[in-house]
Image: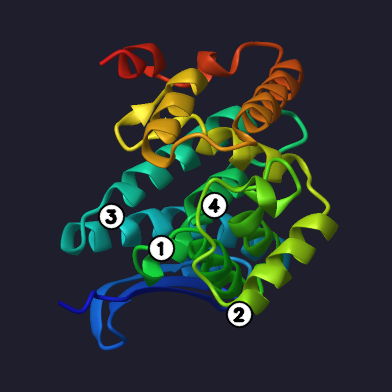
Amino acid sequence: MKKDILTLGIESSCDETSVSVVKNGREILSNIIDTQIPIHEKYGGVVPEIASRNHIEAISRVTKKALEEANKANPGPWYDHSKYVALACQNIASRCQDMDEDLAYVYGILHDIGRYAGVTSEKHLIDGYRYCVERGWKKAAQICISHAFMIKDISTSIGIFDMPIEDKEFMARYVKEAVYDDYDYLVQLCDALALPTGFCLLEKRFVDVTIRYGTHPATIERWKAILGIKEHFEKKMGCSIYDCLPGVIENSFR
């Protein structure tokens, strides 16, 4: 049986944000529009600074709603995992003075967006990158790739490069040359803090991934890299990352 292909489209004008999910290029599963018109009416026109900030907040709201509607028609663990990654990003960023929690949430939601193209391994990284590049979301595009490479060498991947050789070569160059910031590191960390069932201890996620993918020559180094990122954010926050992840202990020991 041919698998359905889901496409997530996000469009913004000066005062509106719209998100739609389409199946097989024809069937619209959801179409959500968030308008800022009432906000700008009192100013007699669109105020760029206000519009910019509201777009960030609107994309967060609308993307979540669209994904929820699409998940009803096409359920899968990718949705719940992405939801918890986004929430973890938001919660941790809210305790870091130099980070925007709404942007962090959006990057968390979009990090695995390439999985909408179907069930793939590392191909979802390049699919997500291209999806975001087409819409002008440079940083989100980078995170679609960077979240899988806390070590900047694609040979440390635990997945399969199920893509044309030219795409693999592009990814190798891209990862090597990319400049990571705290949003890259945050999504890398939160990707390791989220199961489809909720937040979890890093060690729980390490075991979960190893059971599913097996061991790899870079497994230990990947774990060390994530633990280093955890330490980095705990210094920024002044507390344990687990302090802002509700239910993390209970979910880890179900």
Label 4 Cα crowd, 10 Å radius (few <14 / some 14-19 / many 20+) = many
Which coloring applies here?
Answer: rainbow
Q: Between marks 3 and 1, how big is the CA–CA gap?
A: 21 Å
Q: Between marks 2 and 4, how big is the CA–CA gap?
A: 17 Å
Task: Read off the residue under disc 4.
Answer: 106
Task: Read off the residue under disc 2.
Answer: 134
Task: Read off the residue under disc 1.
Answer: 120
For label 1, the SS is: loop
Q: Between marks 4 and 1, how big is the CA–CA gap?
A: 22 Å
Please provide percent x and percent y for residue 64.
Answer: 38, 53
Amino acid under label 3? Answer: Glu
Amino acid under label 1? Answer: Thr
Label 3 Cα crowd, 10 Å radius (few <14 / some 14-19 / many 20+) = some
Q: Quadrant of residue 241?
A: top right
Task: Read off the residue under disc 3.
Answer: 68
- Which is closer to the viewer, label 2 or label 4? 2
Amino acid under label 2? Answer: Glu
Q: Nearer the viewer, residue 142 or 213?
A: 213
Does 110 sit left or right of 53 as displayed?
left
Q: Is residue 89 above or below residue 235?
A: below
Which residue lies at the image location 70% right of the left edge and 60% below the top edge?
A: 139
Amino acid under label 4? Answer: Val
Q: Earlier in the sequence, mark 3 or mark 1?
A: 3
Q: Earlier in the sequence, mark 4 or mark 1?
A: 4
- Which is closer to the viewer, label 2 or label 3? 2
**Residue 47 in view in this figure:** no
Q: Earlier in the sequence, mark 2 or mark 4?
A: 4
Q: Quadrant of residue 214?
A: top left
